Image: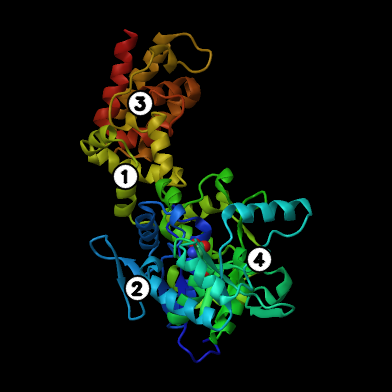
Amino acid sequence: MEENVKKIRVRFAPSPTGSIHIGNLRTALFAWLFARNNQGAFLVRVEDTDRKRLEEDSLKKIFEALKWVNLSVDEGVFLNENNEISQKGELGPYIQSERLEIYQKYIQELLENGKAYYCFCSEERLEEVHKKQQAEKQPLMYDKKCRDLDSEEVQTKIKNGEKYVIRMKIPENEIVKFNDKVFGKISVKTEIIDDQVLIKADGFPTYHFAVVVDDHLMEISHIFRGEDWIPSTPKHVLLYNFLGWEIPTFVHLPNVLGEDKKKLSKREGAVSVEDFRKKGYCPEALINFLALIGWNPKTEQEIFSLEELIKKFSIEGLNKAGGVFNYQKLNWFNKEYIKVMSEDLFEKNVLEFLSEDLKEKILGNSSAFKKILPVLKERIEKFEDISEMAKAGELEYYFSQPEYEIEKILWKEEKDLNQAKVHLEKIISSLEGVTSFKEEEIKTKIWDYATEQGRGSVLWPMRYALSGKDKSPDPFVLAEILGKEETIKRLQYAIGKIN
Ligand code: GLU
């Protein structure tokens, strides 16, 4: 347990600006594991104050992703059993756009205490200021023009309907210090902190203001978020001080990196949780894999169930260095999870990745389908591979007689179709006597003949007659899956084409 006697309360605070990035899912996962490990609460708060970046449907996608990976929400925004976005808990609302009055109350307090001020500078003016700073190689900051306007002037401007924002009055010549559980002690001079906008011209708070107010009012004990937020944290610390609030514990998480050691981005391929779902990754594998990026369980063990992760997780195991997202490693994890997947679930997943056409054929021949499942299980890393196999025609032949040019049943440079026919006829007569139509028995019946005549010359035509493909499992596996009757039928079909 944490040393803190206060109840552990953590939050995941997504902005509905698109699908959920895999790095954000990992943030949510660590916060969730920490809450579960300490009998705490996991809250979800929606940060939708950046009205220009909102994306419809984004919320749904975010919550479906959380549900898919099984991260249950104790408080705040969640997806109810009818798949609708809803809220639960005493300290709501948990969607920032529904909390505007609350932010008003605290901004008034800051204005009254001289910790914030109205700024009437136009966007054009701010641009000019930035341009000048850029030319002089200065940091881009507000030049504090409105910081000391007298209150009468301010009132007149407001009365005249001038547009304004409210900025934070960063104290001069101070050092802001805070401690981060992962990155350690951090201190920053206030000279380099901008007079941050707290309330925008549209009346909405900025992230920085809303996050502090909400984390305080929602009694958050530990703030888990990406390391990108470290530079913003001094402003937050100042706000906590201005408002006389206790500062929560910061737990900034190292970035999830691509192979190029830069923050994982679309350049590398799939990055949103939705992408991974569409590719047919198992949620348990994704979670297991993500948990080990930036966190060290300090054992050799790699496969962890969610329950085991809860037991093992601790903030002390988090690394400062970014963790690389290695797709091959993810595929390895996924294969491990596929190996132990129940037959029913495996079957259900396979069907989801097939076209309607093929599904129909398959369901019309369910005994062959059941037999190919173990073959598929061996061959795939993720369920999208099933669609790829289907597209390459590697599934269809299990369910219907394949079409092919008869010359293709000849092994390598061979030319004599009549010789192939002799082999196929011999195979048929050997198979007729096989009672239990199993791979091993089929092989035993044909092996000596094939060895004597040349294995390629005998087994290639057999395999080709069964699959119609240059590549497929070996003919004994195919024959067992197809069954005696269908196998013989396909061999006869080939013979028929030769005649
Ligand atoms: N809304 C912010 C984001 O989506 C959350 C940052 C935080 O956790 O404080 O990144």
Q: CA distance from mark 1 to mark 3?
A: 26 Å
| Circle 3 crowding by C-alpha within 10 Å: few under 14, some 14–19, many from 20 | many
Sequence order check, earlier mark of 2 and 1: 2
Which image quarter: residue 133? bottom right
Q: Which residue is mark 3?
A: 466
User: Residue at the spot x=43%, y=34% of the render?
Assistant: 473
Q: Amino acid at mark 2?
A: Pro
* Residue situated in front as seen by the camera: 464 or 430: 464
Look at the image and tell me whether residue 320 can be seen.
yes
Q: Is mark 1 within 8 Å of ligand 1?
A: no
Under circle 4, the secondary element is: loop
Q: Which residue is mark 2?
A: 93
Q: Amino acid at mark 3?
A: Leu
Q: Which residue is mark 4?
A: 145
Expressed as whole percent of the image width and height from the top left, the position of residue 444 reads: 40, 35
User: Which is closer to the viewer, label 2 or label 4?
Assistant: 4
Expressed as whole percent of the image width and height from the top left, the position of residue 485 reads: 24, 29
Q: CA distance from mark 1 to mark 4?
A: 61 Å
Against 380, is 264 above or below?
below
Q: CA distance from mark 2 to mark 3?
A: 63 Å
Tag count: 4
| Circle 2 crowding by C-alpha within 10 Å: few under 14, some 14–19, many from 20 | some
Sequence order check, earlier mark of 1 and 4: 4
User: Which is closer to the viewer, label 4 or label 3?
Assistant: 4
Under circle 2, the secondary element is: loop
Expressed as whole percent of the image width and height from the top left, the position of residue 395 reads: 36, 33
Residue 352: mark in rendering: 1
* Residue situated in front as seen by the camera: 194 or 399: 194
